[in-house]
Image (tube, grey):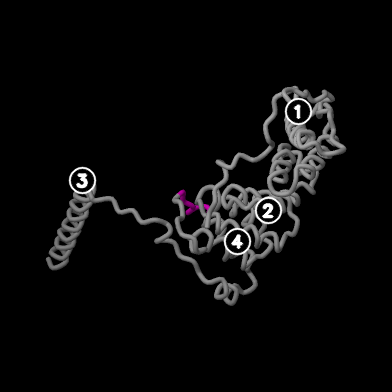
Amino acid sequence: MGTNQTSKSLYFLWAILISLFVFQYTKKANLKLPPIQISMQEASFNIDHRLLSITSMGQKRLISSLFWVHTLMESDYDHYKGKNLNSWMYLRFNTITELEPLFYEAYLFGGQYLSVVKDDPIGARAIYEKGLQNYPNDSRISFHNGFNYLFEFGDVDKAIQNYEVALLDRHFSKFYGNLPTLLSKLKASEESLEIAYLFLLDAYNREPDESPLKPHQETTLYSLKAEMDLDCLNNKRKDCSNIDFRGQFYIFDNDIYKAQDEWKPARVNRRFIKTRD
């Protein structure tokens, strides 16, 4: 009798527990809680890379890879509004590259994510520059670093330096065929029209005749030469060229020299360039 009584008590207890569980689940399912959103900037954590180096037991590459995968899985789209190298994704990329200085993807793709997605050009600049310390003259990192300098900081000089490095790799430059034209326009703004013209002329002469880039380069070359020649002719300087890039003579009309074809100064449109402190 005692055993039966104990069994009944256990069954009764289990029935109560199950009933409570079902009741709780049902109430929770029907209960509308206010949404609580915590940004990754507040919720993420970052372990000091010096501590990780001490405790890694020689597995720095493995740990950096795990951090890389975890960071990509948790990546968000929230813009970082600070200017202090404290965005959570920058801190992660910095930790990864401290553990494994040759983690190329962290520099290349991490910098792009920070610059374009997170709107953290300061963090992107730090990652790119760190990458170029470990991969000097790398064409892809230099190209994106130049883009970040130009379109996020408005630093034309730094953009020119990085773009020139990117163009040293002929194989890479084929995939960014308009880069010589862009670079010539930057040089026209910051250096001189003659330097810009000679630079683009060299790129133009190396392009195959059937290249789709030639017409764009030809238009820019025409504008650069016309600006130089007309300035020279109208200021009555010596040794001026009176023939444009297409072999046509300039027109002298109403006491001023003009080009036969329309042209405009070959410069980068400043409205696409941000200027940050």
Real-space CA distance between mark 1 and mark 3, rounded to the nearest whole angstrom: 82 Å
Viewed as shown, does residue 69 lie left or right of 162? left
Q: Nearer the viewer, mark 3 or mark 2?
A: 2
Q: Which residue bears the numbered disc 1?
A: 257
Which residue is label 4 attached to? 126
Say which element carries label 1. Answer: strand
CA–CA distance in space, label 4 to label 2: 17 Å
Q: Is residue 157 magenta?
A: no
Q: Which residue is mark 2?
A: 157
Mark 1 touching mark 2, by CB under 8 A? no
Residue 100 in the image: state x and y as whole percent: 65, 65
> How far separated are the C-alphas under marks 4 and 1?
49 Å
On screen, residue 160 above or below 60: above
Vertical placement of residue 229 versus 137, above or below = above
**Mark 4 and mark 2 residues within 8 Å of each other at the beta carbon:** no
Tell me where residue 228 appears, x and y as whole percent: 77, 37
Q: Amino acid at mark 3?
A: Asn
Element class at badge 4? helix
Which residue is identified by label 3? 30
Of the two numbered discs 3 and 2 on the same chain, state the one appearing first in sequence.
3
Nearer-N-terminus badge (4/3): 3
The answer to whether mark 4 and mark 3 are in CB contact below 8 A is no
Quadrant for residue 203, please give it. top right
